[in-house]
Amino acid sequence: MKPFLHYLVYQAKLRSKLFLSYGVVGIIPFLIFSAFIITLTNRQLKTSARNNFDSVFYSCSTSLNQKIEQVETAMNILASDSNMGSIINTDYQNSYDKYFYITNYFDSIVNTIVITNPELANMNFYVNSSLAGIRTTFFSFEDFKKSNVYQQIHNTFTVQWFLHDNQFSAYIKIYDPNNPALYAVMEVMIPIDAIIDPQLFENLDFYVTLRNQMISSSTIKNYPPPPRSDAEMAIMGGEGLLQAYMSDRYDTSIEKTSSLLILLGILAAFVLLLFTIHRFADGFAKRIQVINHALSETVQNHFSVTLPENYHDEIGELTIKLNKMIRDTARLIQDVYESRIKEREYEMKALQAQLNPHFLYNTLSAINWHALTTNNTSISEIVTALSRFYRTALNSGNNITTIENEFENIKAYVQIQQNIHNHSFDVTYEVEPAILPYHMPNLILQPIVENAIEHGLDLKTDGRGKLTIHAAEHGEEILLEVIDNGVGISQDKLDRLLKQDSKSYGLRNVNKRLELFYGNQYRLEYYSSCVGTTFQIFLPKLKKKN
């Protein structure tokens, strides 16, 4: 048996394998379609049940919110009535006035509200006036201030709900219209059944909470496990929650309903089986042979593959040819990739190489002119600074340097420029020590400083020039900043210096090298006005790998 299976799997032609496997293949469509039909039917029935559940829940939650809104509206009407506010906040001087206003006005207002809103029948008032104690509905406000409720409502202006002794309590402030700082508190005690009608929710498994405290439920006695389906609605100022759960009764009779569809699925599976057998015999093997023939004529040793070559049938022959195609293609891709890397490296070096001769010629001319005209000892300082500049600029042929070396380079350059300009401007360096080990492309700051001196400080006619070179961490980036107090540069000229042909190609060089090195992960920003120019470069934090 084992040799036969080995032959069937590794040696027999594909056509033989197809005919021998028809019996196995025949049952696969049957199982797939049966499972598909059962799943589809169950899904549709469950969707229908969920939609019905959501509709019932929406009606119930709407009714519940309407009752709560009705109670809150009635309480707001009482609280906003100026006569009510004046009556219960007045400190009466004699009993006649007290009882006159209570019986003739207060009772009339309250009874009118209670008739239309019987839920408000049990009301209490906490007052700061002499009304405290004259009835069982009037209590001292000072006693109320000692309660936990006062701590939660004294900074609020709306109706606040609480749960006490298995019943709701709602509170609202009633202000004195003549003294806004003086107010009383109305308390309404409402039985749970007056708000939540159990018959309304007879088709739902639900519970209601207020500030995470269980209020009422149907068949759920404790907090349930994760529901099969639920819906939520904010009530009682957003601090109450109504949540309902689908019970198993919504999922009954699924098997009975889907029986007909299952039979249809079985018939469809057998039809597909017959069609598949016919197509397999005359189509699939022939199509593979055509593919093999086409590959033999068109590939001709230009591709390669790494697929397993363990089979000797038509698919095995196809695998061998694909292996060769993929290997050749991979080699070509690698060659192109390496060529592109070298091209970018050469371009980077060429751009950097433009800077060194340009600066060298300008500096040597300046040294010569300075020596002929001034006969000054500062020539030695210039030559020394020039030597230090080129030592850091050339960087042993490396394009990458540290921020510390970059600042050594720019200090040497600025020293040269200060000698050339007879120290006509001051310079300040502000560098955070923590960023000195980070790496960056070489010679980034020098063209920007050169631009600040040439187009800013050299043209300044009033006051002493000042140059500030700043470097610091900026979140996940490094900020390099050059600020001068020169005459400023127009926006059009700044744009030309960075992007178009001009005499000063140094800034374009900087922008291009940053783009080659960082791609789109850097930013170059610049601002200018009549009091100076600011250049900012934002670079990713980069440390050289050991």
Image: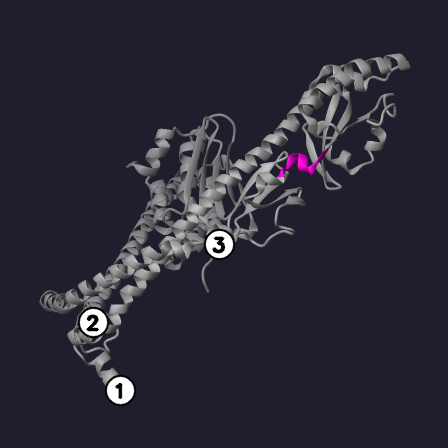
Q: Is residue 71 left or right of residue 10?
A: right
Q: Is residue 309 magenta?
A: no
Q: Which residue is mark 1?
A: 1
Displayed quadrant of residue 119: top right
- Under tag 1, what secondary structure? loop
Judged by depth in the image, the label closer to the viewer, 2 or 3, is 2
User: x, y percentage for residue 527?
Assistant: 44, 33
Quickly name the residue at label 2.
319
**Residue 405: percent from left, percent from top:** 47, 53
In which quarter of the view is residue 343 placed? bottom left
Nearer-N-terminus badge (1/2): 1
For the residues marked 1 and 2, what is the alpha-carbon distance in whole angstroms?
Answer: 28 Å
Q: Earlier in the sequence, mark 2 or mark 3?
A: 2
Residue 23 visible somewhere in the drawing: yes
Residue 192 lies within the magenta run: yes
- Location of residue 102 by image quarter: top right
Front residue (pair 261, 98) = 261
Q: Amino acid at mark 3?
A: Tyr
Q: Nearer the viewer, residue 154 or 432?
A: 154
User: Is 128 in front, or is 207?
Assistant: 207
- The residue where tag 3 is placed is 438
According to the image, what is the colour scheme of the structure? one colour
Image x and y of residue 267, in percent: 25, 60
**Tally of numbered tags:** 3
Residue 203, image x, y percentages: 54, 44
Whether residue 381 can be seen here? no
